Image: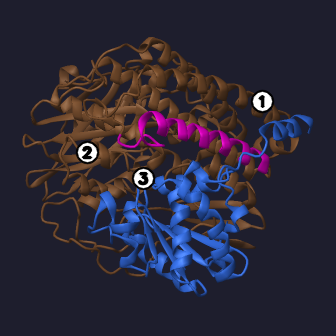
Amino acid sequence: MRELFAGRGAQPIAGAVPAAILRADEALWVEAARSVHDTAGRLVSVWGARRGEDFAVLAAYEIVSGLFVVELPVAASHGRYAGLAGLFPAANRMQRALHDLLGVRADDTQDARPWLRHGGWREDEFPLRADFARSAPGSVEPDRYAFVRVDGDGVHEIPVGPIHAGVIEPGHFRFSVVGEKVLRLEEHLGYTHKGIDKRFESFAVADGHRLAGRISGDSTVAYAWAYSQAAEATLGLAAPPRAAWLRALLLERERIANHLGDLGALGNDGGFGFALAQFMRLKEDWLRATGDAFGHRYAMDAVVPGGVASDPGDAKLAHLAHDAHVLAREVRQLRRIFDEHSGLQDRFITAGRVTPELARRLGLVGLAGRASGQAFDLRVDHPIAPYDEIGVKKIVYVAGDVAARVHGRFDELFESLRLCEAIVERIPHGESRAQLPSAREGFGVGWIEGWRGPVMVALEAGDDGRIRRCHAHDPSWHNWPVLEHAVMGNIVPDFPLINKSFNLTYAGVDL
Amino acid sequence: MIPILLKIARSGIVSEPAPGQRDEWRAAEARIQDEILRMLGRALVIREVDAGSCNGCELEIHAMSGPRYNLEGLGIRFAASPRHADLLLVTGPVAINMREPLRIAYEAMPGPKLVVAVGDCGCNGGIFGESYASVGGVEKVIPVDVAVPGCPPPPVAILQGILTAISSRG
């Protein structure tokens, strides 16, 4: 595929991620999208950027050989481009967000409702444009978001949020129900939009990992690593081998911490409080060990351009490997209890089902995708060091229900625990952080399989060492719309359970 | 059933007399209960509002509810409605789209309307600062009793912030 467009001007993008970029005109933009679609490629992200007085729209696709980026110039006077939502439904919200921020409109969409803009800035103001002058929020008009109405005998609406009942992020869910049965769910997100894309422009390339690591706190390692890959690509730098192994250790520890938390919460939402207490105990001890070895319970700011901020040393690493071994034994006991608990299984099995066909069509990604037969995992499909050396087992289920997402978490947890031990056993000695060379202009990408799914960062660096444009993409962009389908036909009380089984980020997509 | 009971018995009581083995907290634990009793009668009810955080602070607030910290043993619990809350625990820089919901939640609370802002972002906007989309710290929107720094602050620091808020209104 990459080779297919090589004759049409596709150029490899330097760096750790196998990637290429094609600078296209509108016809080639459309042809590339169709070729990717027809060869079972998948959309990763759509974003926009300034190009002098004009603009560019960029799309990143996952194809067999890696990440394929297509850039389409858009004249300011025209302000429109051929949208991708017809081929890749997940593009819809990304294109609406792109319009809210840059004022460039996809011409395929019937859905022109704003996504991130709830009225805090004017309709004719666009934060990512050079002439955008607003430095403080404006007054917000009352929210008049046009939800789709469901009519019929006995149909009523349940509005939920933006502030939810529990300790979770804000967003609005509009349920149309008959009795207890959900006919339709429509999400309205964007409540935590705090201007991250714009904020990146005030950061130096060498510091951007700190902001990237706070796009979605629960995935801080995945974002910081993806950002560092992109930054290193623009600088022509390769992190030392030991750094890659330490980064992988941190990424797997992040995956384990989140899976522990989710398994406890899923048990709890299934009416089994025992699970919450047990898994929270295990997670807390796990976080403390990360804090002891890396100086931060979630390893924020531990992954930096050039390597890792601190090296715990072999004695502490051996201790972490031992912890992993002990944790595996505890989780095996808990899994047996889950499996034999008929009440819990009754709640899990068939709830929130996404068939593999629906998952493929809507582009479900990551952990949830693998529970619906979408067998993609960057650590296996496009392995970078150290995954190319230690190997990762891909965990795939096809049932697509809450039970499959629970099984997937257990299996991935055990696999990540194995990886933690393997990393400590085989980690090379040497430096764990390289000096950054002097600034230079460039474009780089990062692409990391976070615990939720693939996280992507695209970075344009200026020759003054400043970030010119940085776009970070969360897998939740793809999975939120699928959640709307997953709850259809289920009962309202099962929504928290189904929602938790996806556990998507709001902050990561509101940006 | 037997495996569950065995697991519970073998896990034992993991709650720590002092979260994180911090000595300054050991003395504080008795004080927090005294303060809660003196000020509120029996217990402290918290409504948490994420006004735009990265969800890092939510992770630590969740962690604080875990068995190691024994929050309910201290008489503290979370409520779904601000109308049932003594204290609003607010995270994040206040995102423009959350400014009004946060204000409404505060208005809905009964007195004494204690407010604890959590994290560097809740203190002053943190890494996100103030912009077209970020109002900045929580006190820009509602009155704040105590602001707990940290990114994110660990559970013990959040608990200490809650204690400080209770005693500051004594």
Question: Dividing the picture into quarters, in which one does residue A69 lie?
Answer: top left
Circle 3 residue: A509
**SS class, disc 3:** helix
Q: Colour of chain B?
A: blue
Q: Residue at x 71, y 25 (%)?
A: A329
Pinpoint the chain carrying mark 3.
A
* Magenta-colored stretch includes residue A276: yes
Q: Mark 2 sits on what residue? A: A208
Does residue A351 show up? no
Disc 1/disc 3 C-alpha distance (Å): 36 Å
When asked about the image quadrant of residue A164, the answer is bottom right
For residue A184, which quarter of the picture? bottom right
Tell which circle, 1 or 3, labels the residue nearer the N-terminal end: 1
The residue at which mark 1 appears reads as A333
Q: Is residue A70 above or below residue B92?
A: above
Which quadrant: the C terminus of chain B? bottom right
Instruction: Work out whether disc 3 and disc 2 sit on a shared chain.
Output: yes
